[in-house]
Amino acid sequence: MKKSLDDFVADLHARGFKLDEEAIGFIYFGRKFTGAEDQLIKMAIEVTLKCQKRFDSSFYMSVLEELSGKEWSGKDEMTAHLKAKGMAL
């Protein structure tokens, strides 16, 4: 079963990634702005935390916009695409 975005954020918190209210609000703003599915939102959050070592709202939004509007077969395909764009994942 896939985790909801709420569960994903709660899991991050449990693992030590304590996102403040502003970051959480921005995550949901990005979802509404792009109309992206939770899988893309979660991927954008993961990539942001891996690359920036913290939640950076502008980086998150750029990753989310890059992933939005395309059909992906899964996380591996999204990761390969972002690596091809030069992200060190």
Image (tube, helix red, strand yellow):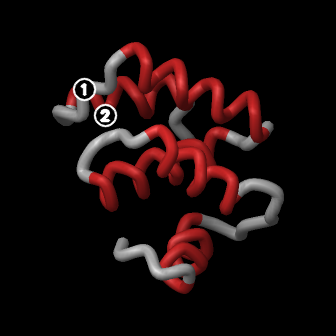
Q: Position of residue 32 (x, y in %)?
A: 74, 28
Q: Could you tell me the amino acid type at mark 1?
A: Lys
| Quarter-of-image position of residue 67 | bottom right
Query: Alpha-carbon neighbours of circle 2 within 10 Å: few (<14), some, or many (≥20)?
Result: some
Left or right: 34 in relation to 8: right
Q: Position of residue 29 (x, y in %)?
A: 64, 26
| Quarter-of-image position of residue 63 | bottom right
Mark yes or no: residue 1 visible: no
* Furthest-front residue in this view: 58
Residue appearing at x 35%, y 39% in the figure: 55
Residue at which label 2 appears:
12
Q: Secondary structure at mark 1?
A: loop
Instruction: Select label 2 or label 1 by which is in front.
Output: 1
Give the numbered dot on residue 18.
1
State which quarter of the image contains the C terminus: bottom left
Q: Could you tell me the amino acid type at mark 2?
A: Leu
Q: Secondary structure at mark 2?
A: helix
